[in-house]
Image: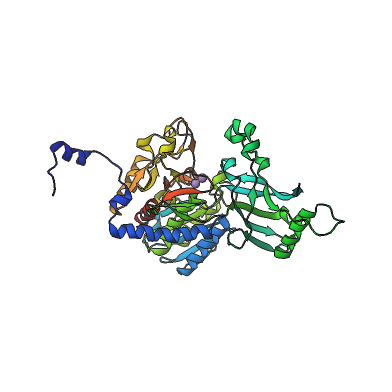
Amino acid sequence: MSEKKSKGQELQKELAYKKQNYYEAAGKEERKAIFEYAEGYKAFLDAAKTEREACDYAVEAAKKCGFSEYRFGDPLKAGDKKYFVNRGKSVVVFRVGSKNLEEDGMRLIASHIDAPRIDIKQNPLYEDSGMAFLKTHYYGGIKKYQWTAIPLALHGVVVLKDGTKVTVRVGESPKDPVFYINDLLPHLGGEQMSGHANKLIDGEQLNVLVGGLPYDDKDVSEKIKLSVLSVLHKQYGICEEDFLSAELSAVPAYGARDVGFDRALIGAYGHDDRVCAYPALTALLWNETEHTVLAMLVDKEEIGSEGTTGIQCKVYEDLMEEISLAMGANFRKVRMASKCLSSDVTAAYDPNFANVYERNNSAILSCGTAMCKFTGARGKSGSNDANAEFVGEVRKMFKEGGVVWQTAELGKVDVGGGGTVAKFVAQLNIDTVDLGVPVISMHAPWEVVSKADVYSNYKAFLAFMK
Ligand code: MN
Ligand code: MN
């Protein structure tokens, strides 16, 4: 029974813009695909909680799909499937396409695989009052109080004095112990609770509890510290001095889980930005392309994209230049013709905190991956602010690819802001726009996304690569 639409209703349908809930828009088959895709994503989240682990995961997945390692100077030809590892902490997986590089450029998808966490200091171990602790220095923008009183796992590497690298990963198996940051009981928390939230716990109070068993020798001082050291030595061959050249991080010990009776959502540590890295990786691994496409999984975005593994490092530009050289193309022309999706998450509109969002221009959960024409703060400071022409071009790609997507801005104009890798890629003379999945409770130890938005992100990348 179809009712005839009024003239105004017809006109409204033709002229007005309305966001679509992707679950509503998707047919039965597509809903099935959304849920199936989420299973692979959750497995990735559990396997890859740090940038090193995400890098390893990407390399293994690439190898399984017939990709091989690329080194600067290697010859390349159309059809080649390669990956380039940067110091074990970032990786670029790429396909060399058949299209002319100078005319067609490269299609880049740049996402990051580091996430906010609690890093262990270089001289961390001490004991006090029946407990052994590790001193820490947090990484990225966190609400410090969220990291207390939750189970933590330790991930990372320790480089021993002979140069051997030992991998540490404790707290992920149900048989493993976990670690913990103490908080104050409410009974004594009166003064704490009356202060500002950023003073609830100080950086120097984020000490990770790692032991409590005194070493059995009455002649020894610091018995608990010694018993922790003896376990570390037995299991990993680590002495206290080896912490000097260690990179250990405390991350939430819990895994990715479905959220909600209907399982529409996923809760996990580090959706930001693995929720873009995984779709970038799988879109590239699973689909052949005529373009030369690079999925760039980079490090250090959470601290400003610095260092040798952040996107500001010349290594990524060098890689693009090497590919151009190997294909006999002028790098400047290649850059000029290239296009990039800076793929990072944005904030999902949260009705529980409605006052910081402007609803019309916020990403609504399950309405698809979100394009941010600009990021930044105040008067768009620190933003890439993509050209309308490029946004129009990407919009057309998404239309042709049947992508349900939306536009977004992080929050209200005066409230805050944030940045991404977009502006650094744009500096290379490459048209770039931000695109990524809306996240609830971004940067919390456990964040929430919609499965529909994850799959929409994957489909958006397919459309962009096509
Ligand atoms: Mn991010
Ligand atoms: Mn972030």
Residue in front for this viewpoint, 213 or 390: 213
Task: Give x and y (percent) for residue 445.
Answer: 54, 47
Can residue 406 be seen here?
yes
Residue in front for this viewpoint, 438 or 153: 153
Name the residue: 65% across, 45% down: 182
Left or right: residue 24 compared with residue 42: left
- Find residue 241 and report its image quarter: bottom right
Task: Give x and y (percent) for residue 415.
Answer: 47, 31
Task: Give x and y (percent) for residue 231.
Answer: 73, 61
Task: Give x and y (percent) for residue 145.
Answer: 59, 41
Residue in front for this viewpoint, 335 or 284: 284
- Find residue 245 and report its image quarter: bottom right
Taking the view exactly as shown, the residue that stands out farthest to the front is 187
Can residue 283 be seen here?
no
Left or right: residue 369 compared with residue 277: left
Total marks placed: 0
Residue in front for this viewpoint, 390 or 257: 257
In the image, residue 206 above or below residue 284 = above
Left or right: residue 127 compared with residue 430: right
Query: By what rule are the colours in the image chosen?
Result: rainbow
Question: What quarter of the picture does the C terminus occupy?
Answer: bottom left
Left or right: residue 346 compared with residue 11: right
Taking the view exactly as shown, the residue that stands out farthest to the right is 219
